[in-house]
Image (cartoon, rainbow, N blue to C red):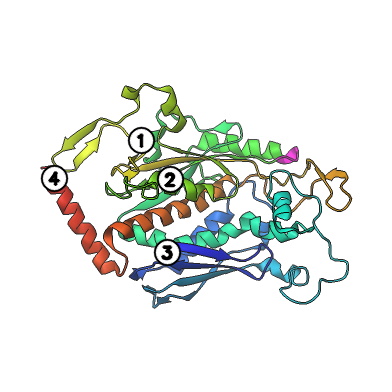
Amino acid sequence: MRYMTAGESHGPCLTAIVEGVPAGLRVSEDQINQDLARRQSGYGRGGRQTIERDRVSVTSGVRFGRTLGTPVALAVANRDWENWTERMAAFGEAPEGLVREVTPRPGHADLVGALKVDTDDCRDILERASARETAARVAASGIPREFLAELGVDVLSFVASIGPAAMKEDDPLAAAASYDQLAIEQSEVRCPDPEATEAMKRAIDRAKREGESLGGTFRIVVKGLVPGVGGYATARDRLTSRLAAALFSIPAIKGVEFGLGFEAARRPGSQVHDPIVRDAVFGFSRTSNNAGGLEGGMTTGLPLVITCAMKPIPTLMTPLRTVNLDTLEPEDASKERSDVCAVPAAAVVAEGEVAFVLAQAYEEKFGCDTMTDIRGALRAYRERLKTMSR
């Protein structure tokens, strides 16, 4: 299962096509719209979120609420297109007096993209490099999320820190799988700790007053995975590399840790590796989850725990210095309508990226034609694992 997106930030719509979808999977339009709403929510979001009210339109691959086994096409309309029809027209001549973007923002794709494709208008780059593109990703990820849920796998996320404000956790890995989804979504920054939520909001307010932006960290937690999904034989088989690549594809993600992550480099082996035990009911397990649910590129059956670091958004209301592409003189960087902080939204996007990788790995192991066969193969696998631990 994989996706492709198309569309510009201020174009008519964002489009996604998902292929490798098995037949017979129940898909909920309402659930996709809820995820789109979660992506738009969060304390510190900018003016664009008051314009757009993202809703998905499924145009192929689904009939009467179930997939047909063919590619699924989805679209999310851009309401702001009404204000950009002349400036972003697909055909015709550029309108007279067109305002070009010639002051690239430090930290954005503006300058390097313009150099790459030989343009003197950063608008050609920033329209696609914009995080607005991730709305299409979230819409597309509704398919693998439904797929995994039907197989007993739940994907969630929460914010652990924003700028200097962070949750206080004695054992982050143990706590990660215990947080209540409702408590997370009720927080304005998608953090399950009320005290940390207020500290994060104060940090965002301070950054807004100063014309700054803030990044932070969030965790992805996946529960219900069976052991042995993924592979060890080749580099591409390993879920570690596939998940990291998917998460680094999200704009502004600068760090990814599995389990202990960098902390594992500071500890001796006896305090890093998870002792194996056997349980008469649950089979083989571990007494800890320092590996974060992955060993040798495969799932262990324990919760998958991934921590991601997001840099601050590069659009600043108090801009950094740049160079004007026309005059080649120093100037302030451009200011697009932007967020102060989008860490809670990035976590929702990351859920979708993780869901795609895991759905693909499940299909590789249990089949991809129809949900009937996939469920049967998964049941048989679970039974075989029970016999091995008896």
Of labels 3 and 1, earlier in sequence is 3
> Do the residues bearing badges 4 and 3 touch, measured as CB atoms within 8 Å?
no
Q: Is residue 337 visible?
A: no
Q: Which residue is mark 3?
A: 143
Q: Residue 49's quadrant in the figure?
A: bottom right
Q: Look at label 2 and name its amino acid.
A: Ser
What percent of the width, then of the height, locates residue 386?
15, 48
Of labels 4 and 3, earlier in sequence is 3
Q: Nearer the viewer, mark 2 or mark 3?
A: 2
Q: Which residue is mark 1?
A: 291
Of labels 2 and 3, earlier in sequence is 3
Q: Secondary structure at mark 3?
A: helix
Q: CA distance from mark 1 to mark 2?
A: 14 Å
With respect to residue 34, does 240 lie above or below?
Answer: above
Q: Look at label 1 and name its amino acid.
A: Ala
Magenta range is 208-212
Q: Nearer the viewer, mark 1 or mark 2?
A: 2
Tell me which residue sits at (79%, 56%) in the image.
101
Of labels 1 and 2, earlier in sequence is 2
Of labels 4 and 2, earlier in sequence is 2
Of labels 4 and 1, earlier in sequence is 1
